[in-house]
Image: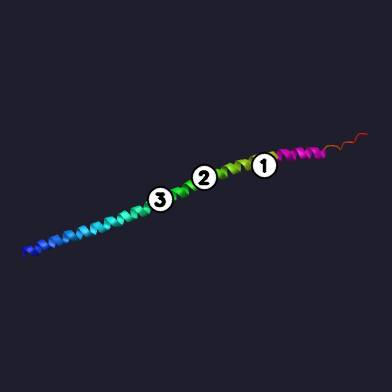
Amino acid sequence: MFLTKQHLVMARTLGVAIVATVGLSACATYKDEFAGINSRLDQLDAKVQSAAQSADAANQSAQQANQRLDQMESRVQSLESAPTRVPRG
């Protein structure tokens, strides 16, 4: 009977060790997967940040171009409303 109890204790210990090993290996797999996903998310975040900066720069350029167009429009309107010149000679 004593050997049977020893065998049960040994079997339980081995069972716990096997379950712990399998559980830890699964955690390691998930850690690797999460690390990969986090890496891809970081790359996407960097791309989004870069795109946002590019969009801001394009927006500023467009605003400057609109200001120049507004200045040209006022100049064109003043030239169109000026009296016509009589050609010489």
**Residue drawn at 16 percent across, 58 percent down:** 13
Q: Which residue is mark 1?
A: 66
Q: Which residue is mark 3?
A: 38
Q: Which residues are magenta?
A: 69-81
Measure the alpha-carbon separation of dots 1 and 3: 41 Å
- Rendered location of residue 45, percent (x, y): 47, 48
Which label is found at residue 22? none
The quarter of the displayed image where residue 77 is located: top right
Measure the alpha-carbon separation of dots 2 and 3: 18 Å
**Residue drawn at 9 percent across, 65 percent down:** 4
Q: Which residue is mark 2?
A: 50
Q: Amino acid at mark 3?
A: Asn
Quarter containing the N terminus: bottom left
Q: In terms of secondary structure, where does tag 3 sit?
A: helix
The quarter of the displayed image where residue 18 is located: bottom left
Q: Amino acid at mark 2?
A: Ser
Quarter containing the C terminus: top right
Image-based side of 11 in relation to 2, left or right = right
**Residue drawn at 44 percent across, 48 percent down:** 42
Q: Earlier in the sequence, mark 2 or mark 1?
A: 2
